[in-house]
Amino acid sequence: MNIVTGSDHAGFDLKHSLVEFLEGQGHTVNDKGTLAKERCDYPDYAAAVARAVMAGEADLGILVCGTGIGMAMSANKIAGIRAAVVSDVFSARATREHNDANVLCLGERVVGVGLAQDIVSAFVGAQFEGGRHQGRIDKMMALEG
Ligand code: RB5
């Protein structure tokens, strides 16, 4: 899979380890930054990843900040993005299968590396189930106006 990643300074270390993890699993990763641990603003990286996903540069996006929350709020401002903050494996799978999430948001201050790897594996490995969920996604996306 082609995956685009991004983080702010607070998510830098976890993102770096997840990029290595994903590449080790055979995925192609395009990291949009931040590239150093200097303080920066998470909306800049959320926008870069969200726009890359919507441009078809990647199948899925992964964003990391301190909590994952600011990244999700920002990414969801980009039309077509369904970004989910996840801190457990069940939700990681469910948000792909039911919500057709296209961006996963993680908090480095919330989850450890091992759990984050399991969350990412579940997210990347799951598929949207369609069916009864498609109409709900259509209603959700119609809310964008
Ligand atoms: C940075 O201190 C922190 O606010 C940011 O990484 C994120 O957690 C915001 O949602």
Image (spheres, helix red, strand yellow):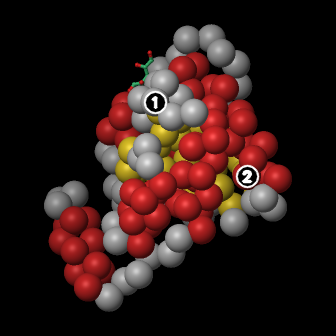
The answer to whether residue 46 is seen in the rendering is no
Q: Amino acid at mark 2?
A: Leu
Residue 98 at x, y = what percent?
A: 34, 71
Residue 123 at x, y = what percent?
A: 53, 60
Q: How many residues crowd mark 1 within 10 Å: few (<14), some (14–19), many (20+)?
A: some
Vertical placement of residue 38 versus 10, above or below: above
* Residue at x 18%, y 71% (from the top left corner): 139
Q: Quadrant of ligand 1?
A: top left
Vertical placement of residue 80 versus 30, above or below: below
Residue 51 at x, y = what percent?
A: 50, 50
Could you tell me which secondary element the residue under label 1 belongs to?
A: loop
Vertical placement of residue 14 versus 41, above or below: below
Q: How many residues crowd mark 2 within 10 Å: few (<14), some (14–19), many (20+)?
A: some
Q: Which disc number belongs to residue 22?
A: 2
| Separation (CA) of disc 1 from disc 2 | 20 Å
Which picture quadrant has residue 10? top right
Q: Which disc number belongs to residue 110?
A: 1
* Residue at x 46%, y 30% (from the top left corner): 110
Q: Is residue 102 left or right of residue 145?
A: right
Q: Which disc number belongs to residue 98?
A: none
**Which is more toward the observer, 91 or 145?**
91
Vertical placement of residue 126 versus 65, above or below: below
Could you tell me which secondary element the residue under label 2 belongs to?
A: helix
Q: Is residue 77 left or right of residue 107?
A: left
Label 1 vs label 2, nearer the camera: 1
Residue 117 at x, y = what percent?
A: 63, 47
* Residue at x 36%, y 34% (from the top left corner): 69
The answer to whether residue 17 is seen in the rendering is yes
**Which is more toward the observer, 99 or 34?**
99
Mark found first going from the N terminus, 1 or 2: 2
